[in-house]
Image: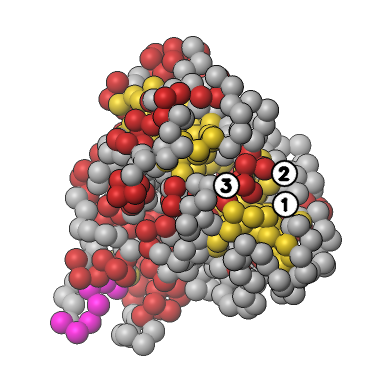
Amino acid sequence: MSGAGWAGPGAEGEVPALRVRDEVSWLHRVLVCSPGRELSLVPPNERDRYLVEDVLCPERAIAQHREFARVLGTLMRAGPAGGAARVLDVRDELRAAFADPAATGAAGLLLDQICEAEQAIYAGHARFPFQEVRGALQASLDSGDVDALVERVIGGLPAERPHPEQPLFLLGPAPNAIFARDYQAVLGAGAVIGAMAKEARWREPAIARFLFAVRPTLRPRGVPFDGAAPGAFSPPAPRPVAREDAGGGAAGVPTGGARMPPAGGAAWIEGGDVMALSPDCVAIGIGERTTWRGAESLALGLRLLRGLDPESFPFRELVAVELPRRRAMMHLDTVFTLVDRGLALAFPPLTFPGAREEMDVVSCDLTAPFEAPVRWTWEGPFSRAMAARLSTPGRPLTLVAGGGARRPHQHREQWCDGCNAVAVGPGVAVVYQRNRLTNAALAELPVAARDPARVAVMGRADEEHLRPFRVWPSEEIDEESAREAVAAGERIAACIDGSELGRARGGPHCMTMALYREGS
């Protein structure tokens, strides 16, 4: 299995490369992963194993991602960062790292970890040719053919003449590496490296750990959180888990239908479930991919880091949101993402006030000593708990229904990542063009807000808070028009064609790992 850990802030006096304390401040640096040949290698009969819904067209996916990265960078440069804004690519970072003689030892360790993860996947199915695969990867490293090595690390190694009963690959492809958010998440001045629930994704955290360990662009230093051998997860020692009612109920006697978090289990944690809501509060989704034990480990890690450096890690509270354990809503960011301060795209059946399946929220104190038990306190249903943390005077938490007012459309557009937007800055976001009802609600926000089935406004909102968005096709966005729109204070929903990208089950938020946000 993949391990989880922390990459911390740079040496004293350095300008930090990592700083994320909320979801909407202006992006200065972001990490993406462009797709490649791995998308063409997924066998139709193994789609479930590789976590893709269909056989993708690589050429279209590559072109769509290229346009996504262009628009993302264009909007970033229109903000406060100007020409200093940078869109980094995992593939480029890997090439630079493999070409760096100082990183040779770490590169060898990465290749070991990749082979060990693949060997664990093969266990019980077939004999994994460890030495053959490890030798092929090392040969590319030794020859200096970094392009070939990157393609092998992400795209895999097909078997030349596979036996009918044997796997098609010596080393399988990693088609989900495109979703860079999932295997890492920056909080404060550090990055938590994921521990992935699905074996097809065990390679990705090893890549992330390697890049944070060797690339100057990521300023990798700090507090290694586990120090574990490859394939092991070593969180801090377990603590007793309890839950109390926020209104004063007894521990272990939740109200409102909330369940006691189960003890023990695997410590899975994935970046799509982790969000810095504000400098005070981090949210984590508990569902198909992230477990209560993973949330407990994150709580202990943030307590530890806050104790060591409260300026870099200021968070005072971790709130956990209990998701249904369904493929359709595998991460918190598939049902809720912020596009402005106090304004979010949300899946109504799980988030709107009074919805039948409205999610429970519990919290734990990050200011408590590291040695103290992790104690979960019930905070109520999602809409109420999030409103208490994200509302400000005149700007109450406002939930824009992904898919509009009708349930069939909500389910359809949630499946197509209608709730999965990435904020480039306050009121400037990138969305998928195909989710027309979600985008229409943004364009018609003052009118839509009169219909509580389309927009849930959790308080008294001023006119500024309900300003409409300009729903802007990506092909119309260039450097000059973006600067003019941002300078004029327009709200922007930049629409990209994600018809092919979305078939791999992820949206703009999944594809972006924010590294630095201005003023966050």
Which range of residues does the magenta coloring cover?
164-170
On the question of residue 89 being in view, the answer is no
Q: Which residue is mark 3?
A: 383
* Residue 113, placed above or below residue 102: below
For image coordinates 57% across by 51% down, the residue present is 382
Question: In the rendered view, does 207 fall on the left or right side of 407?
Answer: right
* Residue 337, placed above or below residue 468: below
For image coordinates 50% across by 64% down, the residue present is 287
* Residue 313, placed above or below residue 392: below
Whole-percent x, y for residue 222 in the image: 70, 53
Query: Is disc 2 surrounded by few (<14), some (14 to 19) or many (20+) residues within 10 Å?
Result: some
Whole-percent x, y for residue 132 in the image: 33, 76
Is-magenta flag for residue 167?
yes
Whole-percent x, y for residue 379 in the image: 68, 55
Q: Where is residue 232, by image quadrant?
A: bottom right
Q: Which residue is mark 2?
A: 280
Q: Farthest residue toward the bottom?
A: 124
Label 3 or label 1, whichever lies nearer to me, is: 3
The amino acid sitting under disc 2 is: Asp
User: Judging from the image, what secondary structure is the residue with disc 2 in?
Assistant: loop
Question: In the rendered view, does 132 fall on the left or right side of 89?
Answer: left
* Closest to the observer, 506 or 191: 506
The amino acid sitting under disc 1 is: Glu
Would you say the magenta stretch is mainly helix, strand or loop? loop
Task: Mark 1 or mark 2: name the one nearer the start of the chain.
Answer: 2
How far is disc 3 from disc 2 in space, using C-alphas? 18 Å
Q: Which residue is mark 1?
A: 317
**Label 1–label 2 contact, CB within 8 A:** yes
The amino acid sitting under disc 3 is: Ser
